[in-house]
Amino acid sequence: MKTIQILVVEDERIVADDIKMSLQRLGYVVSGMTSSGEEAVKKEELRNRKFNFWSIVHPDDKKLIMEKANKRGKEEQSSYEFRIISKDGEEKLEK
């Protein structure tokens, strides 16, 4: 039997958390939470296709990401900024 997964879309965080807990008590798997329909569509697009992370990373930032990943846990800063390229070709900064 296939597990039903639900993406919670709610702009009020407290309400979203309550919905998530209620669904989990009923036996559903909450695959994620987001505060907007636009973001939900993006998440579903990523979930429903074979996603290659490297396909969206700006070419100039790939080496930086690999270096930081190899150092993860060995230094204080575990997050960092890098650029991605969106479907429409726009560069966006990720943190």
Image: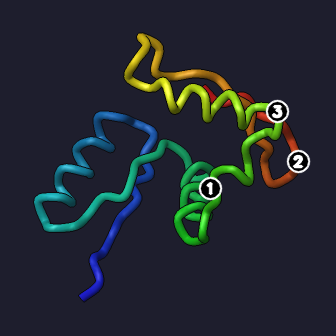
Query: What residue sits 60% from the left and 28% below the top?
Result: 67
Query: Left or right of 91: which side holds 69?
Result: left
Nearer the viewer's eye, disc 2 or disc 1? 2
| Picture quadrant of residue 30 | bottom left
Q: Position of residue 21 (x, y in %)?
A: 18, 50
Disc 1 on helix, strand or loop? helix
- Relative to 66, say whether 16 is above or below: below
Query: What residue sits 60% from the left and 69% below the top?
Result: 50
Nearer the viewer's eye, disc 1 or disc 3? 3
Q: Which quadrant holds the C terminus?
A: top right
Q: CA distance from mark 1 to mark 3?
A: 24 Å
Q: CA distance from mark 3 to mark 2?
A: 15 Å
Colour option used: rainbow
Query: Left or right of 23: which side holds 89?
Result: right
The residue labelled by disc 3 is 60
Q: Earlier in the sequence, mark 2 or mark 1?
A: 1
Viewer-proximal residue, 79 or 87?
A: 79
Query: Left or right of 22: which side holds 34?
Result: right
- Relative to 26, say whether 69 is above or below: above
Viewer-proximal residue, 36 or 59?
A: 59
Residue 89, numbered label: 2
Query: What residue sits 64% from the left and 23% below the top?
Result: 81
Nearer the viewer's eye, disc 3 or disc 2? 3
| Picture quadrant of residue 74 | top left
Q: Amino acid at mark 2?
A: Gly
Crowd tier of the residue under label 3, counting other residues whose Cα lies within 10 Å: few below 14, some 14–19, many 20 or above: few
Q: CA distance from mark 2 to mark 1?
A: 15 Å
Q: Amino acid at mark 1?
A: Lys
Q: Which quadrant holds the N terminus?
A: bottom left
Q: Position of residue 32 (x, y in %)?
A: 39, 52
Residue 42, numbered label: 1
Viewer-proximal residue, 67 or 86?
A: 67
